[in-house]
């Protein structure tokens, strides 16, 4: 009888301390009015004063809106190399009342104030997907795989690389490619997605097209792996081997695969968003968007599935996610609210 009672008490305690993840739609920005037309949204951010900044890489501009969605200002609009010109913007970040706008084509970061007035330009020769600002340094992920020193780098504001690390792929240590085609295929299927927790000073790293089980790593600030995490998707999801061949051909039989879209550090949690997809000769099909919630030590806490195909760019300290629908006929900025409760 005592054993049964202890089991019941234990079950109650576990459920009292269970974590639940919720993601709820809040609002959108973007329609057919002149100041609200977007062509290709590639990044966006919400600042603590609740202003919204949207980067459009097809028309090469950045627009500012207030929280109510009212248009405030637009800069850029011309593809070029001059001051406040923009080409392709995969990352915009807020830090200490400033914006840092990374242009992948120009290999340039434009620092502005919150009125979008330019302050300074930073030039460096590393091709990256994402840029994080921490302690007067840039942290980013290299797209190239030739440099075996690592694909996560820490660089000072003068463009000097202080350190780089994480030379691992999901298939093991990075190997020197045989040729450019081999490099392109490996780079595509082993591209990393990461974020950095500024309080804990650690990284959470995953792979864009993952194996199943998915592999994630937690690294400290020096690049040492402190934990490896395996997360098992549903059995039907497999690695998209059709991406490993050239020319690319859709498989005869429909296969299901996952794509890691983003990793976010939020309070004491790591949040991973995963696009669930399928592909066959009949065409591509979106199967759902999965959120995976880990604590800061890598313990799995909860999962959540949405039927919306959204790529999220940034998260605020109070849990607002900002992103866009990849395949929308009229590109719009979407804002969702993330809640984590016991």
Image: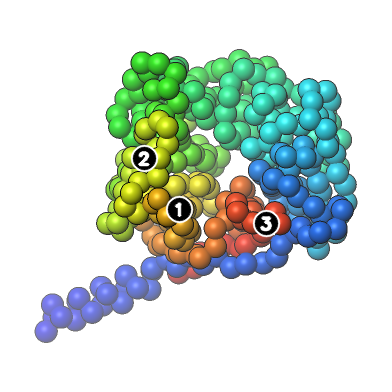
Q: Position of residue 175 (x, y in %)?
A: 34, 20
The answer to whether residue 257 is seen in the rendering is yes
Report the residue that reaches farthest toward the bottom: 1
- Pair 3/1: label in front: 1
Residue that carries the numbered disc 2 in the rendered image: 242
Residue at 52% from the left image edge and 46% from the top image edge: 262
**Cα distance between the residues tagged 3 and 2:** 27 Å
**Marks 2 and 1: which is nearer the front?**
1
Mark 1: secondary structure:
strand
Residue nearest the observer in this picture, 299 or 38:
38
User: From mark 3 to mark 1, how far is it between C-alphas?
Assistant: 18 Å
Which residue is depicted at the point 29% across and 29% down?
Answer: 172
Q: Which residue is mark 1?
A: 283
Q: In this figure, which residue is indicated by the disc labeled 3?
A: 329
The quadrant where residue 136 appears: top right
Q: Position of residue 106 (x, y in %)?
A: 70, 24
Q: Earlier in the sequence, mark 3 or mark 1?
A: 1
Up-down relation of residue 318 to residue 113 (above or below): below
- Element type at mark 2: helix
Tell me if residue 165 can be seen.
no
Choose between 19 and 12: the one closer to the eye.
19
Residue 305 in the image: state x and y as whole percent: 45, 64
């Amino acid at each position: 009888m005592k054993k049964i009672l202890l089991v019941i008490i234990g079950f109650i305690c576990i459920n009292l301390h269970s974590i639940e993840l919720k993601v709820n739609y809040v609002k959108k920005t973007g329609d057919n009015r002149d100041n609200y037309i977007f062509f290709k949204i590639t990044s966006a951010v919400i600042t603590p004063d609740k202003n919204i900044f949207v980067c459009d890489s097809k028309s090469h501009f950045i627009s500012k809106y207030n929280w109510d969605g009212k248009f405030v200002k637009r800069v850029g609009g011309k593809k070029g190399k001059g001051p406040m010109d923009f080409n392709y913007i995969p990352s915009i970040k807020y830090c200490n009342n400033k914006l840092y706008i990374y242009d992948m084509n120009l290999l340039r970061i434009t620092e502005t104030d919150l009125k979008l007035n330019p302050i300074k330009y930073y030039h460096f020769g590393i091709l990256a997907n994402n840029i994080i600002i921490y302690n007067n340094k840039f942290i980013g992920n290299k797209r190239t795989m030739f440099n075996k020193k690592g694909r996560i780098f820490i660089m000072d504001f003068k463009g000097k690389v202080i350190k780089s690390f994480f030379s691992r792929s999901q298939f093991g240590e990075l190997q020197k490619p045989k040729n450019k085609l081999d490099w392109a295929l490996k780079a595509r299927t082993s591209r990393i997605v990461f974020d950095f927790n500024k309080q804990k000073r650690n990284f959470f790293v995953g792979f864009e097209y993952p194996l199943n089980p998915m592999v994630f790593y937690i690294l400290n600030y020096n690049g040492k792996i402190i934990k490896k995490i395996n997360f098992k998707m549903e059995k039907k999801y497999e690695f998209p081997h059709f991406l490993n061949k050239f020319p690319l051909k859709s498989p005869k039989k429909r296969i299901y695969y996952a794509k890691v879209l983003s990793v976010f550090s939020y309070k004491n949690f790591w949040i991973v968003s995963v696009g669930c997809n399928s592909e066959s000769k009949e065409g591509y099909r979106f199967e759902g968007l999965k959120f995976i919630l880990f604590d800061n030590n890598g313990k799995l806490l909860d999962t959540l599935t949405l039927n919306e195909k959204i790529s999220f760019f940034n998260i605020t300290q109070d849990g607002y996610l900002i992103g866009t629908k990849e395949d929308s006929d009229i590109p719009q900025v979407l804002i969702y609210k993330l809640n984590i409760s016991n």
